Image (cartoon, coloured by chain):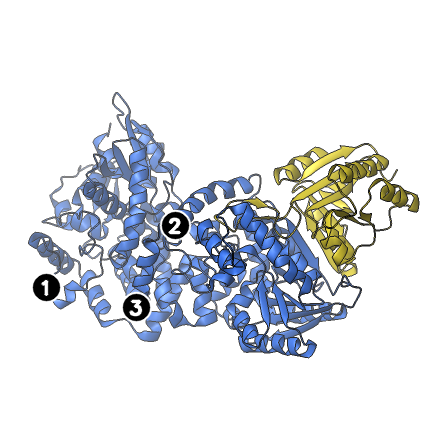
Chain colours: A blue, B yellow
Amino acid sequence: MATEFKHAIERALANPNLTGALGRFSEAYVVTRAKAYEGIDFEAVRGEIAAIKGGAAERLDELAQEFTSAASAKGVTVVRARTPEEVRAYVLGLAARHGATRVVKSKSMASEEIHLNPALIEAGIEVQETDLGEWIIQLAGQRPSHMVMPAIHLTKEDVAEIFSKEVKERIAADIPRLVKLARKELREKFLNADIGISGANVAVAETGSLVIITNEGNARLVTTLPRIHVAVVGLEKLVPHLADIVPILKALPRSATSQLLTSYVSIITGPAPSPDGSAKELHVILMDNRRTEMAADPKFKEALQCIRCASCLNVCPVYRLVGGHVFGDVYAGGIGTILTAWFNELQKSADIQGLCIQCGNCRDVCPGKIDIPELIVEIRRRLVKEKGQPTVQKAIFSVVNNRRLFHAMLRSASLAQKPFVKDGLIRHLPMFLSGLAEFRSLPAIAPKPFRDEIRRIEQPKDCREKAAFFGGCLIDFAYPEMGAAVVRVLNAAGIEVTFPEGQTCCGAPARYSGAFEVAAQNAADNIAALADPDVRYVVSACATCTAALKHEFANALATSGRTGELPAAKALAEKTWDFSTLVKQLVDEGRLAFAPGGERTPITYHDSCHLKRTLRVTTQPRDLLALAGYELREMFESDMCCGMGGSYSVKFPEISTPILARKLDNVEKTGAGLATMDCPGCVMQIRGGLDKRGSPVATRHIAELLAERLA
Amino acid sequence: MYEAFRARAEAVSAEVHRVATRREALDFVADHLRREGVSDAPQARAVWADDGRLTSVERDGLAARAPGLTFAVTKEAAADSRVGVSEMTWGLADTGSVFQDATDPALRLVSTLPPQHVALLRTDRIIPDLPSLLARVDPRSAPYLSLITGPSRTADIERVLTIGVHGPERLIVVCYDGGGE
């Protein structure tokens, strides 16, 4: 990772205005977005959008031709541009032909993408951004830090400072007055401009229409006042039919700004007359810039379903800390990482992609139904493929996959009380157990791994079913008591628990760093180890491991071309259970009960990312806690990532720390003396953090709590 | 339908009024122009982009009651006005939006440049939603279609909602019953 990048992160985190503004906004966003979607079936709407845009991505060229003929018939000059150079050259040529010297622009990410402004300015043309946020950014000489709210990183004081410089008088930091000033200053520019440049939110092929939405009204002026209107439109804006704009206009304002509709929606189909009665010129530049290539990519064509609402930024635990100047390039956040890898180059995204903690929040809110975290992992896979797996990383995975060696190393390091300070190889171990993070206390490494401990547990002889326990590194090496609790609970339902010795790492660390060959081998080894036909259930008490067994094994094998092993992966997935879901099922079947005791104990529950957003489990653990006599006190943002993210917390401790701090605050604010969850990784993070701050709140895995209250 | 429209429009800071007849609607506008101090002075004028619905008698009457009101809409006149007036074709109940075919640039000038936009709308022209609208209008025969939902707004500075940026800071919708009477 570039040192400059690390510095940029540090600077962002040290900027209280930035983190404060983004933090407050992201907290409010979840609430206002939900309100805007009231009465709307979000899943249905995004299903429609994904189908429309996904279908369009498969025939971009055809739609571009259809748009061209429809729009041309209405008198529009439509040009196709393959590269950013071609777009810039066309606009410059047009300006030169008309002797145009003044350009007004409404907000267009497409023009940002190709750095149109600098090219115009270099040619002696005055370019005026008119969206308030874009204008602020332009005056400040910066780039947008958010696709919808370009200046979200600046305070009103910053803006007052920037405006004061521009108008050469002292302007007060009063928002309504700042807005008035923008209106006044830009009004003249609108009235005197030769060319108006806009983007488009949708381009309808069958009618040749552009749909442009704004709140400020600047796009109406940009498309009305100057005699020439140029629209720079990315090919991914094309949809086949007019009716297709309905779901997009339903979702875009709601997801972007929590509005039912923006103040202005303009549908432009051919040049409408100019105010002075002269004929209007309308030029539409359909810009490719690798979109066709992207559409041909089996993985990344999905990214063309983006409607640029930026909700993936708004819900991102990392974006809300560092903002878009760090987490992104022209386009920011999750989708920005993906677009940067294509519109710039793969290498450009190398640093940025590492910031994704894979919590899955963005996937749940994306109105284009894009699996953003998955595409970011795909970037990692391609980076590994392009550059090869780093030697150190290779060596690390060979240790991680050798369970006994891994345990022995962790144990000796743990005993030495100074984890991995010597020995070149181990020092680089990027695993979350390596102890490089100082913001949380680390668990002691158990003297004996759970795989050995379980053999000493006496299990009932009369069990009628068998379950194989998948330990995962944390329960196996650090928290064997959680494994023991799982055994006790399942025993009570008449299930014997085995620990197949051949099991190894679930492959999540390899997968999340893009080492798919390693992840596929992990999958194959585990499938073989867990193949016992007598086993009715494969159960894991780790949300990440369960997600791997249930979903990622097949994915890793398929991606690595090992399709022959897919049926076995599917068979394993079908009998894999996360602990809480299995236990709830056993309770429902009348095979298990709890003794709630007298007074109900207040408790708060943390939803682990993979449990909630990959396995879709939320009610089962809550129901079980109630049955076992706990009084649930929901914390704020219970489903927000705790900042663990496996090796993420070691790679970016500076980011993991504030994410954890928020989580701990929310835990403590409930007043419950006990926090529980379904993932040992989250336990390690949250318990470590609470311990470090001297909090009296205890952290337990749900299996331990349930084992204590068996009837 | 009207109540739904009104609630949604007011929720985005539009002002909604309802009168019984078209004549009352015109009276409302004339009164409004007077209340707002419209006069034949810079930045105090009013522009009315009439799409042919006003009779010459109505025009003369309005002009007499509101000095400073002109029906000759130019970009200069609109930029110099306090109030812009136009008649909308449809209202959308589920978003509180008003719609017009704004191919005539005068319609866009009066609804964007002055700080206030008074929009007349027949109450019986309020329809449920965008799909209902798209069933009634065809962009192929109208180059510039315009949906307006509340006044111009921004939240670009510190996410604080501020009304009135490049477009009007007030959108006043005057709904009139009684069809075209």
Name the disc covering residue A2, or none: 3
Looking at the image, is mark 1 or mark 3 nearer the viewer? 3
Q: Are marks 1 and 3 in contact (CB under 8 Å)?
A: no
Q: Which one is closest to the eye, mark 3 or mark 2?
A: 2
Q: Are marks 3 and 2 in contact (CB under 8 Å)?
A: no
Q: Is residue A147 visible?
A: no
Position of residue A348 in the picture relative to residue A150 (left or right): left
Residue A92 in sight: yes
Is label 1 in a helix, a strand or a loop? loop
- Give, as a three-letter code, the residue at label 3: Ala
- The chain letter for the residue carrying disc 2 is A
**Picture quarter with the N terminus of chain A:** bottom left
- How far apart in space, not on screen, are marks 3 and 2 (Cα)? 25 Å
Question: Which residue does the numbered mark 2 point to in the structure image?
Answer: A17
Towards the viewer: A214 or A71: A214
- The first of marks 1 and 3 along the sequence is 3
Amino acid beneath label 1: Lys
Q: Nearer the viewer, mark 2 or mark 1?
A: 2
- In primary-sequence order, the first of circles 3 and 2 is 3
Counting residues from the start of the chain, the first of labels 2 and 1 encountered is: 2
- Residue A634's quadrant in the figure? top left
Quadrant assignment, res A375:
bottom left
Query: In the drawing, does residue B167 fall left or right of residue A336?
Result: right
Rendered image: mark on residue A422: 1
Quadrant in the picture for residue A707: top left
Counting from the top left corner in percent of width and height, residue A40 is at 57, 42
Q: Is residue A415 left or right of residue A52?
A: left
